[in-house]
Image (spheres, grey):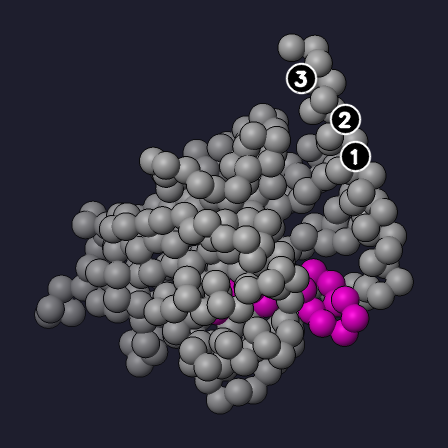
Amino acid sequence: MHNIFSHLANQITKSILLSLLFGGLLFGCTSISEQEQLISIKRDGVVTRSNGDCSKTKSNKIQAEISLPGFSSDSISIFDWNMHKGKNQNWTLDFLNLSHGKDIIFLQEASLTEKLKQILHGNTMVWNMNAAFKYKGVETGVLFASTIQPLSSCGLRQKEPLIRIPKTILINRYKITDSTQVLLTANIHGINFSPGTGSYQEQFTRLLDILEMHEGPMILAGDFNNWNTKRTSIVKHLAERLSLQALMFNNEGRTTFFGNSVDHIFYRGLEVVTHAVHQVISSDHNPISVIFRLAHTQTVLESNQ
């Protein structure tokens, strides 16, 4: 048993040292914005940039405009993937095949290359990103792509305590057709290697402060980097506070680090229709797909309203 813990400690130490080295090598080619950096594109092709800091949000109660399109309450399809910045071979083919026809795409470590933008444009999707940093002129961070325009967007970011490069969160809200409910989606890339859990806890506390203001259905997904028991406890506490259910997997297949699955989808106010984990070699994470429908208990607009 002692040898197992010693081996695990050595592996963690090596990973931290590699992160520091990687951060040092990156830093000369990396630029980090002083403020939150949300990048968005609409159907007219216009790209906008804004601060979009969630901490300045006064209220999360968003009224869905009747004229705007919404997701079907019977089927909301999701694709979630840490794409490893698209550095591995065949990521394009896997992304095209596995994300095809999905309503909302959650990406972590999304590198906003011309290739990725072309794919999203080809699928007639709108997208927005909370950029963590810019490497060799290309923004990288968490990204949402969807078949409809979000009602609102905001972001959070937290600097890694060792390499000082941020991890980001992006929160979008969408209209649901024939429903009084607004769907909140949160895309997270969790703090990775750190001496303790202080920064990790702070990231989730800030996220909880925003999400607990939302009263309707919710999807929280991404790479949580919960590779030990303490981190997993922090994630479970947030899920309990928000009454979120974890998407369960019979045959697993999710990517693990130090024996812990780190890619998760949590939800509430929704029912699972079908879901799957996809085995790939085009990233160091296996993507997840799921189809939800609005839970039967949710308030649906009556025909006379």
Point out the tag, 1 or 3, that comes first from the N-terminus: 3
Place of residue 68 in the rendered image (x, y in percent of width and height, measured from the top left): 34, 78
Q: Label 2, on which residue?
A: 10
Q: Is residue 243 left or right of residue 91?
A: left
Magenta span covers which residues? 129-145
Q: Are marks 1 and 3 in contact (CB under 8 Å)?
A: no
Q: Is residue 242 magenta?
A: no
Question: Disc 3 residue type?
Answer: Ile
Q: Label 3, on which residue?
A: 4
Q: Are marks 2 and 1 in contact (CB under 8 Å)?
A: yes
Residue 150 in the image: above or below residue 242: below
Q: Label 1, on which residue?
A: 14
Q: Is residue 73 left or right of residue 45?
A: left
Residue at the extreme bottom of the image, as rendered: 44
Place of residue 139 in the rendered image (x, y in percent of width and height, measured from the top left): 69, 69
Position of the C terminus by quadrant: bottom left
CA separation in Å, label 2 and label 3: 10 Å
Q: Quadrant of residue 25?
A: bottom right
Which residue occupies 89% across, 62% down? Answer: 28
Which residue occupies 56% across, 57% down? Answer: 282
Which residue occupies 52% across, 37% down? Answer: 261
Question: Disc 2 residue type?
Answer: Asn
Q: Quadrant of residue 74?
A: bottom left
Which residue occupies 50% across, 49% down? Answer: 286
Q: Callout 1: few (<14), some (14-19), or many (20+) C-alpha neighbours within 10 Å?
A: few
Q: Is residue 132 magenta?
A: yes
Q: Main secondary structure of the magenta part?
A: strand
Q: Secondary structure at mark 3?
A: helix
Residue 183 in the image: above or below residue 203: below
Place of residue 296 in the rendered image (x, y in percent of width and height, measured from the top left): 19, 50
The residue nearer to you, when weighing 287 against 244, is 287
